[in-house]
């Protein structure tokens, strides 16, 4: 792919009226029109209303994918892009003023292949639920494995890194979703990350009018973890990531073992005995490499207990669990039916 632009923003849309707000927030970033492009991928079955001034701009392209799903739509947009950095924005989210300047400053200074900023989560009315300031940097593979979400909306990814991992995995291969988290896991196995503390994006959360299937998200997470662990260099990269986090190194070392132990159990349950043996061998290698870390309570906390990602904790602390009431109701109904 020839990169003739500095940045390409890809916006898959299902025809929400908020699309114009998302587009305008990118246009207002202050970059020269020759430095960036916006690729809108219309994944609805209807043409977009032709009533917005931005639709006639030379650096905006509209592509129709006709309800193929958001993963396909994003990959189609990326394939048509010409930017050195790729930015994926949803049609119901928007960028904050000065976001691209902050992200590009970090990108050019760090040479990281995934740069991100802080972000604000809002409900359907636009009211702030929480502001999150992630602090991962460098080799972040163990944190990505632990589901510490770095939103695409708040990130720039080099096109080289994106295409090197073959872009977004199909939703089917991940059990129906989790493609954004999976992308961060795949890229973190090969490339480093960097951050800015500036809030760069506003992201709507909740399950109302969302295309995300939250009901099966734990199964999606399992599919993604298994695919990530299967990557040949995953173990070495995860161990190196744990070592690279001095303040929490013991804990993250324990989490590496936790995920291989969980994978071994899963593979045994599915009668994949050779894979289970491989996972067990890596688990034992993790214990051997841990050495004196095994004397730490943090290490055993990582080995034994599940990890609770910051986004879920922030939503809980904000008293915003009601934003996922439909998901909880559907999950409860599924559990009830399974017990009959």
Image (cartoon, rainbow, N blue to C red):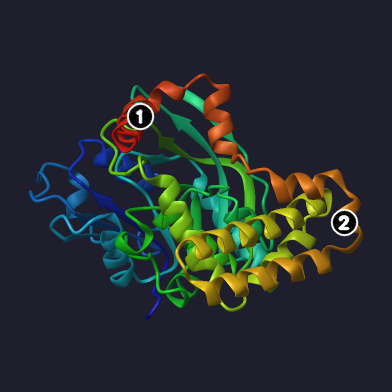
User: Looking at the image, which is closer to me, 104 or 115?
Assistant: 115
Query: Residue 195: image x %, image y %?
Result: 63, 52
Who is closer to the viewer here, 120 or 182? 182
Left or right of residue 224, residue 168 in this image: left
Residue at point 54%, 37% (across, down): 311
Mark number displayed over residue 293: 2
Q: Where is residue 131 in the image (x, y as percent from the top left)?
A: 56, 31
Q: Callout 1: helix, strand or loop?
A: helix
Bin the neighbour count of mark 1 within 10 Å (Cα to Cα): few under 14, some 14-19, many 20 and up: few
In the foreground, 147 or 100: 147
Quadrant of the rendered structure where residue 172 is?
Answer: bottom left
Residue 45 in view in this figure: yes
For label 1, the residue is 332
In the rendered image, which quarter contains the C terminus?
A: top left
Give residue 216's position: percent from left, percent from top. 37, 45
Which picture quadrant has residue 60? Answer: bottom left
Give the residue furthest to the front: 340
Element marked by disc 2? helix
In the rendered picture of this protein, how many numbered marks are placed on residues? 2
Query: Up-down: is 186 above or below 198?
Result: below
Q: Is residue 105 above or below residue 196?
A: below
Residue lying furthest top: 319
Residue drawn at x 35%, y 34% is 335
Quadrant of the rendered structure where residue 306 is? Answer: top right
- The image shows residue 183 at horizontal and vertical percentages of 46, 62
In-image side of 43 versus 315 (left or right): left
Q: Residue at x 48, y 67 (%)?
A: 227
Does the image show residue 30? Answer: no
Is 178 on the left-hand or right-hand side of 304? left
Give above or below for 128 relative to 268. above
């Amino acid at each position: 792919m020839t990169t003739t632009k500095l940045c390409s923003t890809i916006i898959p849309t299902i025809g929400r009226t908020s699309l114009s707000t998302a587009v305008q927030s990118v246009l207002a970033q202050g970059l020269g029109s020759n430095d960036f492009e916006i690729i809108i991928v219309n994944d609805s079955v209807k043409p977009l209303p032709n009533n917005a001034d931005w639709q006639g701009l030379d650096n905006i392209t509209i592509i129709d994918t006709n309800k193929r799903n958001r993963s396909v739509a994003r990959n189609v947009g990326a394939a048509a892009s010409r930017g050195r950095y790729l930015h994926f924005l949803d049609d119901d989210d928007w960028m904050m003023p000065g976001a691209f300047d902050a992200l590009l400053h970090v990108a050019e200074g760090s040479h990281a292949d995934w740069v991100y900023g802080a972000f604000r989560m809002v409900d359907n009315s636009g009211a702030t639920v929480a502001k999150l300031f992630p602090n991962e940097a460098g080799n972040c593979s163990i944190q990505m494995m632990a589901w510490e979400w770095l939103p695409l909306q708040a990130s720039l990814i080099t096109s080289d890194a994106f295409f090197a991992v073959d872009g977004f995995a199909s939703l089917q291969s991940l059990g129906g979703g989790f493609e954004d988290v999976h992308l961060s896991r795949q890229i973190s196995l090969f490339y480093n990350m960097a951050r800015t503390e500036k809030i760069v994006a506003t992201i709507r959360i909740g399950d109302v009018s969302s295309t995300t299937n939250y009901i099966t998200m734990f199964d999606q997470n399992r599919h993604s973890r298994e695919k990530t662990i299967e990557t040949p260099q995953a173990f070495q990269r995860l161990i190196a990531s744990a070592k690279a986090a001095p303040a929490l190194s013991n804990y993250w070392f324990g989490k590496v073992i936790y995920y291989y132990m969980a994978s071994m159990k899963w593979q045994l349950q599915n009668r994949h005995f050779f894979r289970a043996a491989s996972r067990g061998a890596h688990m034992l290698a993790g214990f051997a490499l841990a050495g004196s870390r095994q004397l730490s309570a943090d290490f055993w906390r990582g080995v034994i207990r599940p990890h609770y990602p910051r986004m879920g904790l922030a939503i809980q602390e904000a008293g915003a669990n009601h934003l996922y009431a439909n998901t909880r109701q559907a999950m409860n109904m599924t559990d009830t039916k399974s017990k009959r």
